[in-house]
């Protein structure tokens, strides 16, 4: 805990030193998924950042409680159910399973059940909060639901740095809404026929609005004392209105605001230079992406860009990140083959350099650049530890990969072994191996065992071992 961490705080619009309210505990709430459509990479940019923040805070010695909710009741999943005839909860369950599958593949730290609250399991807490807001005149009952009265909360607009007049100018009341003011937002929506609903004594059956669920679950799980927690996170697109509304709901009921000491937001993600949106139909479901690319290359790509910057996600950028990953693997292998001890080491000069850049608002890009600079053999344990801090997991697979990598000068070596009769000059290593194997197959077909053995032995001396099976001949590289 002696190492300093500075973070950009949206609430104060400054980079500030992070200090937990109650060390060694750090309490974080990050807005989770609304599983009413396929999860896309924009979601994962945010969650990958908070995954690394979690790892880094743990590295600094903090005991982190990380809560991330599931908005398992929402207008869109209900609408989708009405369109498709499926049960609305099957839709939610299906999309959330896809999300968790991608979560595992991308190597995010698991969420434990106590810290993964589903909105529909917190209906009593949500209703208590709504009743308290009504009691404070901060909410009112209308024909179609219960609304928050924005004009009663003086701090409204502070997080997103907007003033009320400006907001009022852009707001409208939809024809099917019965609120007093265009800025007011729904806390509870009375059920229309056929919609899922929960009873709410004294008011009427319905379902919670999106904003109130986060306020209620954050209070229940992280801040029962009403004195705030450490970090509230999410994508930058949630600052207004979602996070502004969470503050409006939570802070008037607290003993000692702010709701969260730090508000930390991940930057917007563009896809092939366009804003990703459902209406444009240009978002890439994360499932397809994970089929085409190494999840660790995707992780590296996100971490190479500052977390709060606007990022343009392109097919070409993943290819470049995959090449970067190969370079890290090559460094790892050369250190491993040099016989350096591979026990992860959490301190030393290399880790100190990583801490220095991570301490400056989580500069993961600079941390990766530091790893690309390589490490001395005695720093191998620190190199592994630093990779793990970024959520990259060097494993046996990184070594197995080595056996597919041929030495660059393989063709020259084989020419020396076999003489100029075998035409290999200037061949790429892969081509050279394939050519020698083809010659050997031909020799075997002609029962020329001497030539067949000569070719096999030459490859063996160049570090390539052959294996014959009924499906043909395969090769591996021996270090
Ligand atoms: Zn939220």
Image (cartoon, grey):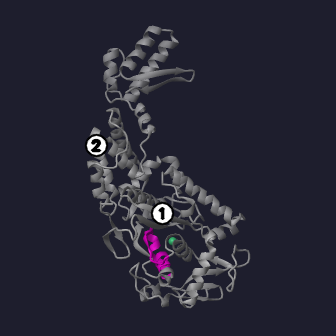
| The label number, if any, that marks residue 451 in the structure image | none
User: The N terminus lies in which quarter of the figure?
Assistant: bottom left
User: Residue at horizontal 47%, vertical 47%?
Assistant: 293
Picture quarter with the C terminus? top left
Position of 315 relative to 189 (above/below): above
Q: Is residue 16 left or right of residue 188?
A: left
Mark 2: few, some, or many residues within 10 Å (few <14, many ≥20)?
A: some
Question: Is the residue 382 above or below the residue 227 in the image?
Answer: above
Q: Which residue is mark 2?
A: 375
Q: Is residue 13 visible?
A: yes
Residue under label 1, please give it: 66
Q: Residue at x 56, y 53 (%)?
A: 101
What secondary structure is found at the residue carrying circle 2? loop
State the image coordinates of residue 194 (x, y, percent, origin top left). 73, 74
Closer to us: 423 or 160: 160
Secondary structure beneath label 1: strand
Magenta residue span: 225-248
């Amino acid at each position: 805990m002696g190492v300093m961490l500075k973070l950009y705080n949206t609430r104060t619009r400054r980079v500030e030193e992070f200090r937990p309210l109650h060390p060694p505990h750090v309490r974080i709430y990050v807005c989770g998924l609304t599983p009413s459509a396929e999860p896309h990479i924009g979601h994962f940019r945010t969650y990958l950042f908070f995954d690394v923040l979690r790892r880094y805070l743990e590295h600094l010695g903090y005991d982190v409680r990380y809560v991330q909710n599931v908005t398992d009741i929402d207008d869109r999943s209900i609408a989708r159910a009405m369109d498709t005839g499926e049960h609305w909860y099957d839709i939610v369950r299906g999309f959330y399973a896809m999300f968790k599958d991608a979560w595992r593949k991308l190597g995010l730290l698991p969420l434990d059940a106590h810290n993964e609250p589903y909105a529909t399991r917190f209906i009593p807490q949500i209703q208590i909060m709504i009743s308290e807001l009504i009691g404070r005149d901060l909410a009112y009952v209308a024909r179609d639901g219960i609304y928050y009265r924005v004009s009663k909360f003086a701090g409204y607009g502070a997080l997103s740095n907007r003033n009320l007049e400006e907001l009022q100018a852009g707001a409208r009341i939809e024809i099917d809404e019965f609120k007093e003011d265009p800025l007011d937002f729904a806390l509870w929506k009375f059920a229309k026929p056929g919609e899922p609903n929960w009873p709410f004594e004294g008011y009427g059956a319905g379902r919670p609005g999106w904003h109130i669920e986060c306020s209620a679950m954050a209070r229940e799980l992280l801040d029962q004392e009403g004195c705030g927690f450490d970090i509230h996170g999410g994508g930058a697109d949630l600052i207004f209105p979602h996070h502004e509304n969470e503050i409006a709901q939570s802070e008037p009921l607290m003993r000692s605001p702010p709701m969260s000491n730090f508000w930390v937001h991940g930057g917007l993600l563009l896809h092939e230079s366009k804003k990703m949106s459902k209406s444009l139909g240009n978002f890439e479901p994360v499932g397809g992406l994970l089929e085409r690319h190494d999840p660790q290359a995707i992780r590296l790509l996100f971490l190479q860009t500052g977390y709060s910057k606007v990022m343009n996600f392109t097919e070409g950028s993943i290819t470049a990140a995959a090449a970067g990953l190969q370079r890290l693997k090559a460094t790892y292998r050369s250190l491993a083959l040099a016989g350096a001890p591979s026990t992860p080491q959490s301190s030393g000069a290399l880790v100190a350099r990583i801490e220095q850049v991570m301490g400056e608002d989580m500069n993961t890009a600079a941390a990766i650049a530091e790893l690309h600079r390589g490490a001395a053999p005695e720093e191998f344990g620190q190199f592994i530890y630093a990779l793990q801090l970024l959520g990259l997991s060097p494993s046996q697979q990184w070594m197995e990969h080595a056996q597919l990598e041929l030495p660059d000068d393989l063709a020259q070596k084989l020419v020396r072994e076999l003489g100029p009769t075998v035409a290999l000059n200037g061949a790429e290593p892969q081509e050279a191996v394939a050519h020698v194997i083809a010659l050997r197959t031909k020799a075997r077909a002609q029962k020329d065992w001497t030539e067949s053995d000569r070719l096999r032995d030459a490859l063996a001396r160049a570090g390539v071992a052959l294996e014959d099976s009924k499906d043909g001949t395969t090769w591996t590289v021996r270090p």
